[in-house]
Image: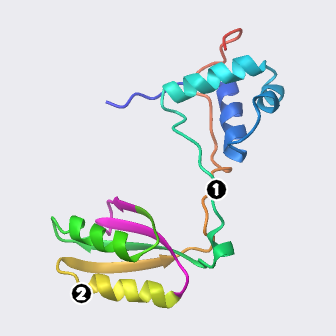
Amino acid sequence: MNTQVEIDEVDVKILNELVKDARSKLKDIAKTCGLSSTAIFNRIERLKATGVITGSVQFLNMSQMGYMYPASIGIDLQPNQEPEIAKILRERTNLVLLSESAGSSSFTIFLVAKSMKEIDDLKQLLRKQAGSNKITVSLWNTPYFSFENVDLRPTRAESHGQS
């Protein structure tokens, strides 16, 4: 069973600073939170240990490298077809994420492409695969993820004097 980790106002401030820039300096986060760098370090380590922070990522602006078409493709597959489709996708696309999903599609792919033809060719290839039924393509207008608008809220009262 997955238990929810409780975070307080200071944790929220730390997380918001790290979402803005995962390379933020401890002293800058400490200044924002009104704590010492050591206290911030200890809190970040606790957030890592509890699984709230699992790593940091640099997001690329793929359009700067010619990948102007971020897309998601939903495929409704018959049972046991996922391994073959996954193999094809890994070999023939600029795959970003591949996941089983719930809803109108049983499988969702996120990818970046340099042309609409690339996406259409992939769609046609997928249609030819045994067991693939409905295929839907959605184009995105931004080729990167942003978590800056996620509204983090404390789940416990601030613990004064505790780092």
Q: Which image quadrant is residue 10 in?
A: top right
Q: Earlier in the sequence, mark 1 or mark 2?
A: 2
Position of residue 124 measured from the top left corner of the image (x, y, whole percent): 33, 89
Label 2: state its secondary structure: loop
- Graded by Cα atoms within 10 Å as few (under 14), some (14 to 19) or many (20 or more), the crowding at tag 1 reads few
Instruction: Give the magenta range.
Output: 98-115
Quadrant location, the N terminus? top left
Residue at the image point whose x is 68% and y is 40% from the top: 18
SS at mark 1 in the image: loop
Q: Is 110 inside the magenta-drawn segment?
A: yes
Give the colour scheme shown: rainbow
Look at the picture and state if 22 lies above or below 156. Answer: below
Left or right of 64? Residue 35 is right
Q: Position of residue 65 (x, y in %)?
A: 64, 74
The location of residue 13, given as percent across then percent down, is 71, 32
Q: Is residue 2 above or below residue 21?
A: above
How many other residues sit within 10 Å of disc 2, few (<14), some (14-19) or many (≥20)?
A: few
Which quadrant holds residue 105? bottom left
To which quarter of the image does residue 3 belong? top left
- In this rendering, the label closer to the viewer, 1 or 2: 2
Q: Which mark is residue 128?
A: 2
Q: Amino acid at mark 1?
A: Ser
Name the residue: 63% across, 53% down.
Answer: 58
The image quadrant where one finds the C terminus is top right
Amino acid found under the numbered disc labelled 2: Lys
Q: Is residue 46 left or right of residue 138?
A: right
